[in-house]
Image: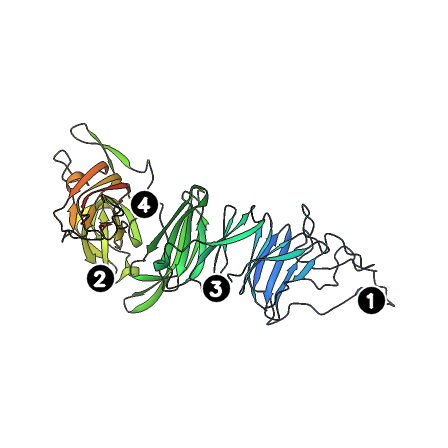
């Protein structure tokens, strides 16, 4: 950053041999930022570089000259004239001194998050832009912000409230002519109890907000406020904890990719791996195969999606049984997908494993279990609500899309059911993986009466499970 008195548009008189070099300096003052007092947050707004959060100036915001990001001259040096393009400096006027913790550019102004509340810097005159003589600050809420950079999702700004346990959305409301900071985590407080330390946003193909928890797990939010979609999910990385996360575009720009720094204990040593989440399964990802009887089936495509953590996939020129190059998983029990079919788990020794059968396409990594559970059932009551009344689930219909492998458990059933029947038939070749299943599948139980009435479904294999819908048939006792 240049000094306040350094104006690149006015270099001053050219020194002569009889004039000392110091005559070039027309004016000088002590800089706002120095060692141990540098700004903590940075943001661009209206073609200005904005700095804030210095320890000695906790509520001060500095905005550079328009279009000149390294120049913070408050006026012209020749005559002291203040123009609209000069830098802006503004201090938040509050009864409390609260450090500025983040800045975010919005079409309605510059949003400012402090430890004690959220503010917005706008032009004092409606319809104008911020200038040194046309700037105003208003406090929009008193929730307080955590020292975590927020993310922008459409016209919404998502930030962590002070305490790092609540994710709030800062949205402009025309009815109140201001910003509202509603709480998005009120329906998933069981996932926020450990607090968060980082936020990132995946725009495509699905709008997902990712939050890194302080305990090393990550939470995803399917966020689409326009269509009122807000679904929370918890993700545990197999054998490790997440240190940091970030979203970057894929090399072909077809999607955004989530990259993670994962800390693990491998062979007695603590290591940190950089891992990338593979793409989500989508329509058209399956591979069509014509069987011997002429029927056409679809099978899982291992080259598109991986359902293993810290995985390594290798395609060989000829079938092999020994898979090497697995030193990063030394001593770990790994899951294996060989030519698109599951293989018994093995332990990595000497950086390699030996398969029970030869294969060309082998994917090796750490297994995890994906679990989904329904809410308590609300159905079947003749009088009033079904909540608190005893109910027995006797059938569940799963509508599946491109799925292979399913384990189901209903409350009171007393056991899990591994569903294998719809995934292989007598027409399928025995030396090939089963085809993917599409359609409805009924699961029956002989359970007992319980008051909650939930269904849990799981995927324990490194294969796709896409549940489109779930329909429960149950009996509810009103007595």
Find out whether the residues at labels 3 and 2 contact each other: C-beta distance under 8 Å: no
**Residue 352, percent across and down?**
23, 58
Gap between marks 1 and 3 measured at Cα: 51 Å
Q: Is residue 179 visible?
A: yes
Horizontally, is 355 left or right of 122 in the view? left
Cα–Cα gap, marks 3 and 2: 47 Å
Q: N-terminal of the two: label 4 or label 1?
A: 1
Tag nearer the camera, 1 or 2: 1
Q: Is tag 3's residue or tag 2's residue first in the polypeptide sequence?
A: 3
Which is more N-terminal, label 4 or label 3?
A: 3
Q: Earlier in the sequence, mark 4 or mark 2?
A: 4
Secondary structure category for the residue under label 3? loop
- The residue where tag 4 is placed is 305
Residue 300 pos. (x, y %):
26, 41
Residue 300 visible in image: no
Q: Gap in Å between the C-alphas at discs 1 and 2?
A: 74 Å
Closer to the camera in the image, 2 or 199: 199
Find disc 3 in the rendering and name its residue.
162
Viewer-nearest of discs 1 and 3: 3
Task: Name the residue tied to disc 2.
Answer: 349
Q: Are marks 4 and 1 in contact (CB under 8 Å)?
A: no
Q: Which residue is mark 1?
A: 23
The CA distance from mark 3 to mark 4 is: 37 Å
């Amino acid at each position: 950053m240049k000094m306040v008195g350094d104006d690149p548009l006015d270099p001053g008189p050219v020194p002569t041999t009889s004039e000392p070099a110091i005559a070039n300096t027309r004016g000088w003052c002590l800089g706002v930022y120095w060692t141990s007092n540098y700004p903590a947050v940075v943001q661009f707004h209206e073609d200005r570089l904005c700095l804030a959060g210095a320890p000695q100036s906790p509520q001060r915001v500095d905005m550079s000259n328009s279009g000149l990001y390294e120049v913070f001259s408050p006026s012209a040096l020749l005559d002291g004239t203040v123009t609209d393009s000069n830098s802006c400096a503004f201090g938040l006027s509050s009864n409390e001194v609260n450090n500025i913790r983040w800045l975010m550019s919005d079409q309605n102004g510059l949003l400012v998050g402090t430890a004690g509340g959220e503010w917005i810097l706008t032009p004092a005159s409606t319809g104008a832009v911020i200038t040194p003589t046309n700037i105003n600050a208003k406090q929009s809420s008193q929730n307080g912000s955590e020292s975590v950079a927020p993310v922008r999702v459409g016209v919404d700004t998502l930030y962590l409230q002070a305490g790092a346990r609540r994710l709030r959305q800062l949205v402009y409301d025309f009815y109140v002519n201001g910003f509202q900071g509603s709480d998005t985590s009120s329906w998933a407080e069981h996932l926020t109890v450990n607090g968060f330390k980082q936020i990132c946003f995946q725009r495509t193909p699905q709008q997902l907000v990712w939050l890194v928890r302080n305990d090393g797990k990550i939470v995803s939010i399917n966020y689409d406020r326009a269509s009122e979609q807000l679904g929370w999910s918890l993700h545990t990385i197999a054998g490790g904890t997440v240190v940091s996360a970030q979203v970057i575009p894929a090399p072909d720009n077809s999607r955004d990719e989530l990259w993670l720094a994962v800390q693990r204990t491998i062979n007695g040593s603590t290591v940190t791996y950089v891992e990338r989440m593979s793409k989500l399964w989508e329509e058209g990802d399956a591979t069509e195969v014509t069987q011997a009887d002429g029927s056409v089936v679809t099978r899982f495509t291992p080259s598109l999606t991986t359902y293993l953590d810290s995985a390594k996939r290798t395609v060989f020129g000829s079938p092999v049984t020994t898979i090497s190059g697995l030193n990063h998983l030394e001593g770990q029990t790994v899951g294996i997908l060989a030519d698109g079919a599951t293989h018994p788990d093995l332990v990595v020794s000497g950086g390699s494993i030996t398969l029970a059968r030869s294969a060309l396409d082998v994917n090796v990594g750490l297994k995890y279990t994906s679990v989904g559970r329904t809410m308590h059932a609300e159905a079947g009551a003749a009088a009033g609500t079904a909540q608190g009344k005893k109910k027995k689930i006797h059938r569940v219909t799963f509508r599946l899309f491109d799925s292979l492998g399913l384990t189901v458990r209903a409350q009171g059933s007393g056991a899990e059911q591994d569903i294998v029947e719809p995934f292989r038939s007598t027409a399928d070749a025995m030396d090939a993986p089963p085809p993917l299943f599409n359609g409805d599948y009924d699961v029956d139980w002989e359970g007992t009466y319980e008051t909650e009435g939930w269904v849990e479904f799981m995927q324990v294999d490194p294969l796709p499970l896409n549940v489109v819908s779930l329909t429960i048939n149950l009996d509810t006792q009103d007595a």
